Amino acid sequence: GIQVEQSPPDLILQEGANSTLRCNFSDSVNNLQWFHQNPWGQLINLFYIPSGTKQNGRLSATTVATERYSLLYISSSQTTDSGVYFCAVATKWGETSGSRLTFGEGTQLTVNP
Amino acid sequence: DSGVTQTPKHLITATGQRVTLRCSPRSGDLSVYWYQQSLDQGLQFLIQYYNGEERAKGNILERFSAQQFPDLHSELNLSSLELGDSALYFCASSVSTPGWGSRQETQYFGPGTRLLVL
């Protein structure tokens, strides 16, 4: 099956700093999503971005499908950005694979005041 | 709020018992997915249903089963529970239309059910 690698595994920032999280995947994808899991365990959709670039406030994401990677940018980080960031991908709908998401291990982000 | 609801939020039970987790998808979504998040296995896909039919299976144990009802809500049944089944169970939904190579849509996740087996 498809492999998803995220880096770095851990990141500690001071409030106000910028950061870049990376997601590499091993096959062509039909779906790529970035999630933020907050300290209460909720998985919050950040972006649906199988290709191209999107921005939402202080967050932006870019996926270069031909090179099989995606980047999540966080600017002017705040303490509320702390948590785990997951990248998840799905390949084209298959007879047995359906449209399942395969998750990376995540990046644990800590933003200190 | 993603529009996906899950009940209960927390569940504490004993080994050997059986529990049922419930999920209501977003209005209009026909696909329902179940995922398990445990400390040692990370976030893993369990099973997908589309409009009442099973569409794909992942690493779902034989002790676990699921179904999607005509009103599109889904239930995940976990039986003969073991300590290792303690995890956060997520339901997600999307409008994904089946068909080889078809476009896939955003999956929206519910708040999860935290299961603790003692």
Image (cartoon, coloured by chain):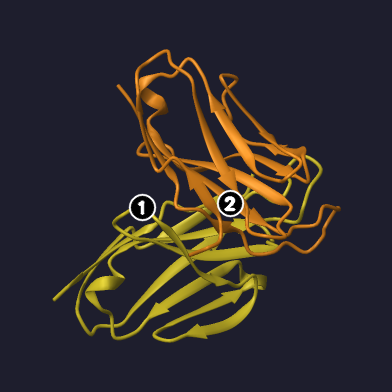
Chain colours: A yellow, B orange
Is residue A9 something that shows in the picture?
yes
Which residue is tagged 2? B92
Q: Position of residue A10 (x, y in %)?
A: 28, 60
At label 2, the amino acid type is Ala
In-image side of B94 versus B60 (left or right): right
Q: Which one is in front, B10 or A37? A: B10
Q: In the rendered view, tell whether residue B19 sits above or below residue A98.
A: above
Instruction: Mark 1 vs mark 2: tell me if same chain.
Output: no
Q: Is residue A87 left or right of residue B88?
A: right
Give the crowd class for mark 1: few <14, some 14-19, many >=20 residues within 10 Å.
Answer: some
Direction right: furthest residue: B99
- Label 2 marks a residue whose chain is B
Instruction: Give the secondary structure at mark 1.
Output: loop
Q: Which residue is mark 1?
A: A41
Q: Quadrant of the C terminus of chain A?
A: bottom left
Left or right: where does residue B93 sit relative to residue A110?
right
Name the residue type under label 1.
Gly
Mark 2 residue element: strand
> What's the residue at 45%, 52% (across, down)?
B111
* Residue in the image at 40% along x and 43% along y: B9
Question: x, y percentage for residue B19?
Answer: 48, 25
Please name whichever residue, B25 or A87, is drawn nearer the observer in this view of the structure. B25
Indicate left or right for A9 with B91 as reference: left
Q: Position of residue B107 (x, y in %)?
A: 61, 59
Q: Is residue B104 above or below residue A78?
A: above
Q: Quadrant of residue A64?
A: bottom right
- Residue A5 in picture, x, y percent from top left: 48, 56
Disc 2 crowd, CA 10 A, few/some/many (<14, 14-19, 20+): many
Numbered mark located on residue A76 in the image: none
Q: Nearer the viewer, residue B42 or A20?
A: B42
- Location of residue A6 with respect to A64 vertically, above or below: above
